[in-house]
Image (tube, rainbow, N blue to C red):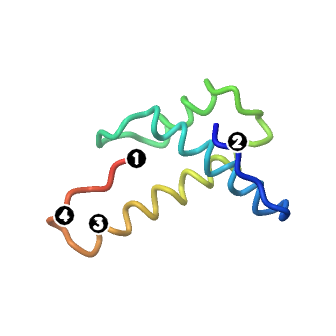
Amino acid sequence: MFNYTTNVQALDNENKALFRASILLENMGNGPGLSADDFFVELLKSEFPTEDHQSVTMAAIAIETMMSAEMSRDPFKEPTVH
């Protein structure tokens, strides 16, 4: 995993969750039709500590929201992939 740290602990924690979420999302693939249940299965199979599951889930939601927001502008544009 990419190791990026700053001197701001809150930012480091958020970046850590984002990198972990991106790993899970990339492992799930780029095809349509993936559900929250699919994500939770991958999260439970991961070696990430249980106490980090909420922050990783929220980071995944943030990533997917940012990626889908682009789609609302142009309905004919191809979707962004992980």
Q: Which residue is mark 3?
A: 71
Looking at the image, which residue is at 40% across and 60% down? 67
Q: Position of residue 42 (x, y in %)?
A: 55, 30
What's the amino acid at mark 4? Lys
Q: Position of residue 25 (x, y in %)?
A: 48, 41
Q: Can you identify the residue that label 1 sits on?
A: 82
In the drawing, does residue 41 fall left or right of residue 10?
left
Q: Which residue is mark 4?
A: 77
* Disc 3, SS: helix
Tell whether 72 sits left or right of 44: left
SS category of the residue bearing label 2: helix
Relative to 55, say whether 29 is above or below.
above
Q: Quadrant of residue 75?
A: bottom left
Which one is closest to the eye, mark 1 or mark 3? 1
| Residue beneath disc 2 | 53
Left or right, 64 with reference to 12: left
